[in-house]
Image (cartoon, grey):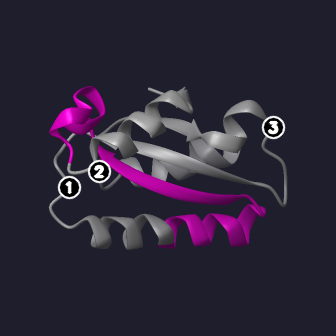
Amino acid sequence: MDAIRIFMARLSERYAIRGAAAYDGFAAGVLRRGGGVNLVVVLCQEIQDPAGVSIDMGWDALTLYLESGIDITPIPVFDGHWREPESAPDPEYINRLKTKSVWLWL
């Protein structure tokens, strides 16, 4: 969990973040060195450049992996889409994320 806290602290220097949730496999398991987590990062502002945001977060994730051995795959989601999935371009994807995620950070 320390790796997730560090990752979120780094992101919060550049992004307004509502919270984060572990998605799928990690949501039911334990984070350990050599393991990984798909991390839904719920952003307060609408994402204008989804690819750019994903790449930016990916660099932080890579840096953290090199430092800790914990593999984090960030999944950025706009808070408005998280709260109202039907407003998202792919509501089924958001609903799937919501039903298979466990909140870690608010």
The residue tagged 3 is 30
Q: Is residue 19 above or below residue 90?
A: above
Q: Position of residue 27 (x, y in %)?
A: 67, 34
Q: Residues within 10 Å of mark 2 (few under 14, many from 20)?
A: some
Residue 74 painted magenta = yes
Q: Are marks 3 and 1 in contact (CB under 8 Å)?
A: no
For residue 47, the mark is 1
- Give the distance between the C-alpha atoms of the residues marked 3 and 1, in whole angstroms: 30 Å
- Give the distance between the C-alpha atoms of the residues marked 2 and 3, in whole angstroms: 27 Å
Q: Residues within 10 Å of mark 1 (few under 14, many from 20)?
A: some
Q: Is residue 98 above or below residue 31?
A: above
Q: Is residue 5 above or below residue 37?
A: above
Image side of residue 55 versus residue 15, left or right: right
Q: Position of residue 7 (x, y in %)?
A: 54, 52
Which stretch did the figure color magenta? 59-88
The residue tagged 2 is 15
Q: Nearer the viewer, residue 1 or 25?
A: 25
Which corner quadrant of the image does residue 84 belong to? top left
Q: Quadrant of the C terminus?
A: top left
Q: Residues within 10 Å of mark 3 (few under 14, many from 20)?
A: few
Residue 103 painted magenta = no
Q: Nearer the viewer, residue 25 or 32?
A: 25
Answer with mark 3 or mark 1, whichever residue precedes in sequence. 3
**SS assignment at label 2:** loop
- Which amino acid type is shown beneath numbered disc 1? Ile
Q: Position of residue 86 (x, y in %)?
A: 20, 34
* Residue visible at 81% across and 37% down in the picture: 30
Q: Position of residue 32 (x, y in %)?
A: 84, 48
**SS assignment at label 1:** loop
Q: Is residue 46 above or below residue 83?
A: below
